[in-house]
Image (spheres, rainbow, N blue to C red):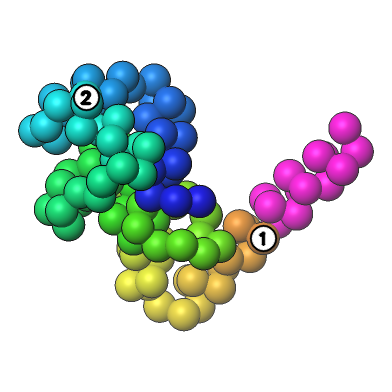
Amino acid sequence: MAFGQKITMLRKQKKIRQTDLGRAVGTSGDIIGKYERGETLPSIEMAAKIADCLGVTLDYLVKDGEYEQIDKVTLSRLKEIEKLPQELKEKIYFFIDVAVRDFKTRQAYS
């Protein structure tokens, strides 16, 4: 997904108008529209402001590839987990694996 498409998707998920996003990052809604249509690309500073406003990392917005959207709260939690001793991390990962497995099982049978 292209940079502009990601902005559009995230903005709509958060129910933010182009005008409001533009105002929040110090530009206009028209410029946000140009970013979304791929007519122009923002500076790295502006892209960082947009990422902050939309609650994602700059990395997510600008990288092509198979990256899933990771919100800043989840990313922050992952960083905190990384600081823990290995034994505790393994326990946390076990519970995450159980929750994911159970969720997938419920989806498969619904």
Residue 15 is left or right of residue 23, and the answer is right
Q: Secondary structure at mark 2?
A: helix
Amino acid at the residue labelled 1? Asp
Name, please, the residue furthest toward the right. 109
| Image quadrant assignment for residue 103 | top right
Return the residue at label 1. 97
Number of the label disc, if any, that sits on residue 47 = none
Residue 59 position, x and y percent, is: 34, 60
| Image quadrant assignment for residue 13 | top left
What residue range appears in magenta?
A: 98-110
Q: Is residue 100 magenta?
A: yes
Q: Is residue 77 above or below residue 11?
A: below
Instruction: Identify the mark nearer the N-term, 2 or 1.
Output: 2
Q: Residue at x 40, y 62 (%)?
A: 63
Of helix, strand and loop, which mostly describes the magenta segment? helix
Residue 29 position, x and y percent, is: 21, 24
Number of the label disc, if any, that sits on residue 29 = 2
